[in-house]
Image (tube, grey):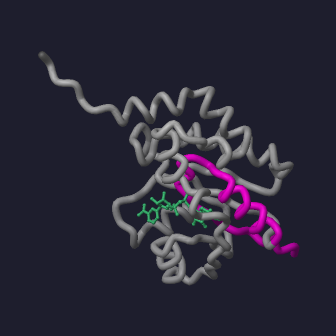
Amino acid sequence: MVRIKRGLLVGRMQPVHLGHMQVIKTILQEVDELIIGIGSAQLSHSIKDPFTAGERVMMLTKSLSENNIVASRYYVLPIQDVACNSVWVSHLEMLTPPFSKVYSGNPLVQRLFVEAGYEVKIPPLFNRKNYSGTEVRRRMLADEDWQSLLPRTVVEVIHEISGVARIKHLNRKEVSEV
Ligand code: NAD
């Protein structure tokens, strides 16, 4: 029987940035297939989580194609949060193909999978100061260069959905009636 090495990476990807793409390429050198879970899929339209799960699926699939990663190497699945951390791993197992190795820099994600008996690997961080969703969103609000932190196709998706206008609108102070 052929044993396929399948890994899992879960991230909010708000938005997908060059750090995510680097880590995906690194992991794909170790596994045959990678499940990429788009975490907190139920969240959108807030400063911290501006983009919908569908928009994040577009960002990921287009940037994977931009990087010549063939579709037979990955699965992109939106994953909603659950109220109880202790059942999150089973929730994920119900929604994804089977996997044997988990990649995450997030201590909570690491802990939950270690306790469930999975092999967990902490992947290297690339330019974390700049390649971070927090930094990208900060630059969008400050009219600074956010584009250079993202794959070209993600910049195109953000233009298509007027993503910067959305985050700026959400950041407005409420105007009181006169
Ligand atoms: P994220 O998008 O910040 O990061 C995802 C992963 O990408 C990281 O673990 C890291 O390995 C990699 N990464 C990020 N920046 C990088 C860089 N510059 N270089 C290299 N790699 C980089 O997402 P996150 O916050 O870790 O996402 C975890 C998700 O899991 C969230 O959606 C969270 O809600 C969900 N979660 C849910 C529950 C629950 O529902 N109870 C419990 C635990 C986690």
Q: How many labels does the image show?
A: 0
Residues in magenta? 1-29
The location of residue 105, given as percent across then percent down, is: 57, 71
Q: Which residue is drawn at 57% across and 52% down?
A: 13
- Look at the image and say whether residue 100 sits in the magenta stretch: no
140 vs 76, left or right, is left
Q: In which quarter of the image is residue 176?
A: top left
The location of residue 171, given as percent across then percent down, is: 36, 36
- Look at the image and say whether residue 12 sits in the magenta stretch: yes
The location of residue 46, given as percent across then percent down, is: 39, 41
The location of residue 96, given as percent across then percent down, is: 62, 59
The answer to which of 80 and 164 lies nearer the viewer is 164
Q: In this view, does 159 lie above or below 51?
A: above
The quarter of the image holding the C terminus is top left
Q: Residue at x 59, y 57 (%)?
A: 130
Q: In this view, does 155 lie above or below 111?
A: above
Q: Residue at x 56, y 57 (%)?
A: 132
Q: In this view, does 118 lie above or below 72?
A: below
Q: Residue at x 39, y 29 (%)?
A: 169
Q: Residue furthest left?
A: 178
Q: Quadrant of residue 29?
A: bottom right
163 vs 96, left or right, is left
The quarter of the image holding the N terminus is bottom right
The answer to which of 99 and 141 lies nearer the viewer is 141
